[in-house]
Amino acid sequence: MAIREKSLIEAAIVHGLINTSDRDQAKLEARRVQRDELTTLCYVKRLSISRFYHAFAAMQQLAFLRPSQIVIDHKRLKRLSPAVIRQFRILPVLMDTQHDQLAYVVTDSPDNPALRNQLPRLMKLEVELCVTDPVTMEYLIHQYSGLQNSILMFDAVDQVNDLLNEAYLNRASDVHIEPLENAYLARIRIDGRLQEHGRRYTHEEGISLISRIKVMANIDIAETRMPQDGGAKHKTPLEDEFDLRIATAPTKYGERITIRLLGTDNQLFTLQQLGMSDGALAQFAEIIQQPHGIILITGPTGSGKSTTLYAALTQLKNEEVNILTAEDPVEMAIDGISQVQMNAKVNFASALRSFLRHDPDIIMVGEIRDSETGEIALKAATTGHLVLSTLHTNSAISSITRLRDIGLEPFLIASSLLGVIAQRLARRLCQQCRESYQASDGEKTALNIDIDQSLTLWQPKGCPLCGGNGYQGRIALFETFWMDDEMEALITEGADELTLRKKAKRFTSLADDGREKVLQGLTTIQELKRLGLIQLFEEVAA
C-alpha cells in the first residue's frame, strides 16, 4: 500500500466517508474474513480505494486526479529515467494552471519523505505533488517506464474480477468493454453516466477479457460474428454475490461486450423514499389501494421503474393479499411475494395466464411488450385484480398511444387504466460540497422564474465523498397522470395525445417536478438540460 492504511482510514473519517463506528465494525469483520481493514471497509461501505486516496489528498491540501484528468507531460517525462519512475512512483503531468515555474508530478505515495527532497533536483524546478489511486498509478508506471511487456503479466481472470469489483464498489449499473482501432476500452456506468476505467487494454488483452467473460456466461467462445446473451454470478472478496446479464455483439474492430449488474443494491425503498412530491405521493398511495385496475410505470431503460414497482408492492404486501409477479429478471427478492423468473419457456403472456388460476389479488408484470400480454393484463385489471406493469415510452400520456399501437382496444384501456407514472433519473447534487450561485436570466426563464427576481441555485464542486464529481447518487423525477371520467371518455373516443395532455386535470409533468428539485438544490439545471427537460419546460409554458 503506497499510503499507510491508518492514514487513509483517518482521512476518510475526517471527510465523512466513514465514521468511527464503521471503522470499529470493519476491524471485527476483517478478522472474520481474514482481510485487511481497508479492503474490508471498501466492500462493507461500497467505497472504491480512490475515495480514500482522495480524502487523504484533501487532508494534505493536494490535488487529486482521476484517470480521465491525468495528462502526461511528455517534455518533462524525458528527464526521468524508468528507474526513478518506479522508485518514487511518479510521473510528470500537465495541469491547467498559470504557474509555469512549477513542475506537477502525480504519485500514489505523497507521504514518501524522499520525494520532496529529490524531485526538485531531478525536475530542475520546484515540484507540486498531485495524488491518484494506486491502481491508476500502477498502470501508468508500467505504461511509461518501458516495462509493460516484461513486467505487467496479464491475467484475464484477475482483470475481469478487478473490473467487476470496481463496478460494484462504485455502485455501477453496467460495464462496457468495447474495441477501438488500436486498443480495447473499458467503461463503467455510474449514476447514469459512462466513465472510462483507469486503463486501456491491447487488442490481445481485450480478446482475453471477452473470452473469460464468455466462459463465465457459458456462451460460445468461438462465435464472434453473431450476438450472444448469457448470465453469470460474481462474488466479491467479502463473498457478496450478485448476478450478471451479459450480451456480446460484433463490431468493426472486434467483439464488444456489455455486462449489466443485477441485485447489487438490496435496499428496498418505501414510497416515502422514492422522492415524489407530497401531492404525487398522496395520489399514488391512494391509487394503489384500489381493488382493481392497472397502473403503468413508464420510462427508458435504467430510469428506476423497478424500484418504484417494488416500493408499491412493499406497501401493498400483507398477510391478507396474494401477490404474484412475472419478471425478467427478478432483480430483488421480496419476502411474502411469489416472484416468477421469465425464461425461454415462460414469457409474460403465459405467466399471466397461469397467474389467473392462482387466485391473485395483485399482479405485477415486468413489462407489456406485445398485444397478447397487454390484453391479458388489461382484462385481469377489469376482472377484480390490481395490476402493475411497465412500458417503454417517453411520457405518461404517450403510454396510451403505445397501448393503442400494439393493438389494444381504446374502451379496454379506458375502463382498466387507473394512472401512469413516467420517470427519469437525474444525478443528485452532493450535499456536502455543492456551491451556491446566482442564476442567470436564461436559467430563470427556463425555470419559469421572473427575471427580475433574485434566485439562488446550486452547482457541483467535487469532494472525496462524491469522488470529485460533485454528484452523489441519483434522484427520480416523476410525471404523474391519473384518470378521471373526462379522460376515460376521451380515450374511449380515440382522442390523440395532444388533446389528452391539454384536457388532463390530474397531471404533473416531468418538467414541473424537475424544476422543483432544482429549486430545492437536489439537482442542477444542467441535469435537466441533459435529460431534455428544459425543452419540456418551454412546451408546457407554450
Image (cartoon, rainbow, N blue to C red):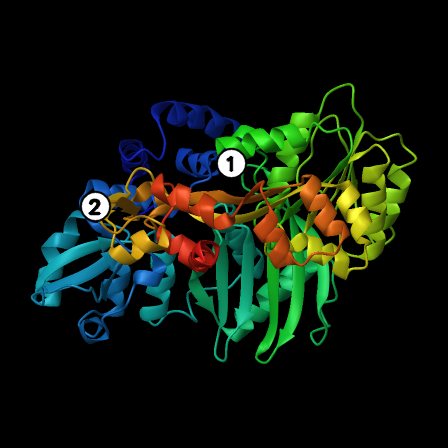
Residue 506 badge: none
Residue visible at 17% across and 62% down in the picture:
104
In the picture of the structure, the residue carrying the numbered disc 2 is 111
Residue located farthest toward the top when viewing the structure as drawn? 319
Q: Residues within 10 Å of mark 1 (few under 14, many from 20)?
A: some
Q: Is the residue 488 above or below the residue 401 in the image?
A: above
Instruction: Describe the element under mark 2 as helix, strand or loop.
Output: loop
In the picture of the structure, the residue carrying the numbered disc 1 is 276
Q: Position of residue 428 (x, y in %)?
A: 41, 44
Q: Which quadrant of the view contains residue 355?
A: top right
- Is 217 in front, or is 111? 217
- Is 505 in front, or is 199? 505
- Viewer can see residue 534: yes
Q: Position of residue 174 (x, y in %)?
A: 56, 54
Q: Is residue 90 left or right of residue 385?
A: left
Instruction: Describe the element under mark 1 as helix, strand or loop.
Output: loop
Residue visible at 69% across and 74% down in the picture:
224
